[in-house]
Amino acid sequence: AQSVTQLDSHVSVSEGTPVLLRCNYSSSYSPSLFWYVQHPNKGLQLLLKYTSAATLVKGINGFEAEFKKSETSFHLTKPSAHMSDAAEYFCVVSVSPAGNKLTFGGGTRVLVKP
Amino acid sequence: DAGITQSPRHKVTETGTPVTLRCHQTENHRYMYWYRQDPGHGLRLIHYSYGVKDTDKGEVSDGYSVSRSKTEDFLLTLESATSSQTSVYFCAISSDRGNNSPLHFGNGTRLTVT
């Protein structure tokens, strides 16, 4: 069965410093992986997705993620945090043949300090 | 934002009463989903629909039913609300099945069962 684990429930960074959000997955099939962001009182928005093309995926707002099959990881990074990055981030896996049935991680809440 | 409207945005109801949440889309997408969000659990799929009158269960479907009589509307009904169903409910849509289809989310309905 597919599963996804976000290793940190909370991350605190200073504005202008790098952000690292860690995600590990397990899957019996070749997965598609996504990162979504949720700002307070809003729905989720897609940041980026990996679908077996390039292992380094670039997303919106300066975020990128690297797919490492050997480590079953899909960590999200950003070189320089901005105050507007304060939100909750979800790592998501979708596995064939389940199609659009997604499994969400528990979320990582990011706090950005001025 | 994708054209997704959830109603109501907030609801308080008593244990044992039926409750219906509505999701309306203007994108003409084939796939629609209901998720619930609880702290530490990320989002969990309740039911989804892959066309008019075509629905299937997700991982937490007990106590919930859905209906889709028109492409644009997907209704979630709690047959007899319980306190464990206090949650934030999100509707999502996607244009296609498969691992490559990102979801677009509504802004959520906060349901409290007293």
Image (cartoon, coloured by chain):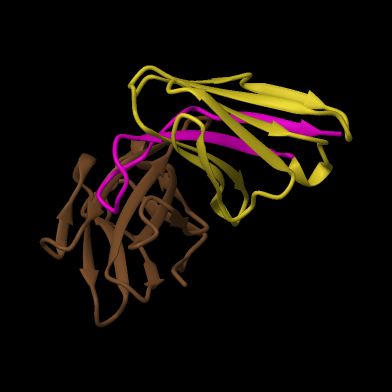
Which residue reaches farthest left?
Answer: A54
How far across and how far down the image is residue A112, in percent? 40, 46
Q: Is residue B75 left or right of residue A50?
A: right
How far across and how far down the image is residue A106, in percent? 52, 58
The magenta region covers B86-114
Camera-nearest residue between B2 and A106: B2
Q: Is residue A21 above or below residue B34?
A: below
Residue B104: quadrant of the picture: top left
Which residue reaches farthest front?
Answer: B53
Q: Is residue B91 magenta?
A: yes
Residue B15: quadrant of the picture: top right
Tell me which residue sits at (87%, 29%) in the image.
B14
Tell me which residue sits at (32%, 42%) in the image.
A46
Q: Is residue B11 left or right of residue B56?
A: right
Which tint is chain B?
yellow
Q: Is residue A53 left or right of residue A23?
A: left
Which tint is chain A?
brown
Q: Is residue A96 above or below residue B105?
A: below
Q: What is the quadrant of the N terminus of chain B in the image? A: top left
How far across and how far down the image is residue B73, in percent? 50, 22
